[in-house]
Amino acid sequence: MAGRPKIFKEEEVLAEAIDLFWRNGYEATSTENLLCRMKLNKGSLYHSFGNKKQLFGRAMDLFAANSLQALNRKVTAAATPLEGIRDFFLELADSDNDTHQKGCFMGNSLAELANIDDELKQKAILHLKALEKVFLKYILQAKQSGELATKEEPGTLARYLLNLWNGINISRRIYPRKDLLLPVIRFQLAVLG
């Protein structure tokens, strides 16, 4: 006998969970908050997503997949890999104040979960390292084509960009104005030539 059919789209309700977790963090987001925001009852939540921890893990996975797709689209649409990477970072300054104040979902999660939940912490680390791998892929392409002139080791540059990503996502909470963020981002990206 089949159960009741789902009357919601998983990706849409996960997007609601992502926004709530991103704004409040894992610990401060209650199951009741999630049920209200996702417009689900407890049975649907637990049947479809498991407990709060499992839901958070799924939210992290979806967020990371969407973010990496966005970066790949940005870079492949650009004239060159380095131009795409630069555009990816420079667009951070164009965000609205609400987005600036949220920072980086994965970075926030890593910082919050470092001493709370090792499994979720490791998941955040893996997703941030996946971002680093995408940076490395495009740095290697730029090096091979001659676009990247620096003698800096590509792995170091990829880790630098990950560090820059994390730093900007903290700094934009302090300086949520484009006129203050852009010069700093441009200065940091000068390492790419």
Image (cartoon, grey):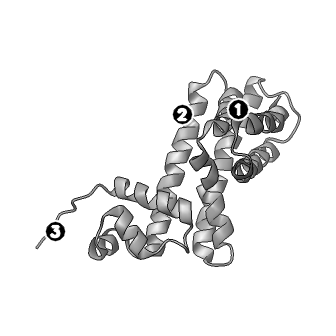
The disc labelled 1 sits on which kind of residue?
Arg
Seen at 74% across and 34% down, the residue is 179
In the image, 164: left or right of 92? right
Q: SS of the residue at dot 1? A: helix
Q: Could you say which disc has been placed on residue 73 in the image? A: 2
Q: How far apart are marks 2 and 1 (CA)?
A: 13 Å
3D distance between C-alphas at marks 3 and 2: 38 Å
Give the percent coordinates (x, y) of residue 81.
67, 29
Which of the marked residues, 2 or 1, is nearer the chain's N terminus? 2
Left or right of 180, for residue 89: left
Q: Residue furthest right?
A: 151
Which residue sits furthest top? 79
Say whether residue 103 is visible.
no
Amino acid at dot 2: Arg
The residue labelled by disc 1 is 86
Q: Where is 189 relative to 163, above or below?
A: above
Mark closer to the observer (2, 1): 1
Q: Which mark is residue 4?
A: 3
Residue 113 is drawn in which quadrant? bottom right
Q: Which of 95 and 58 is in front in this view?
A: 95
Foreground residue, 182 or 139? Answer: 182
Q: Position of residue 171 (x, y in %)?
A: 75, 50
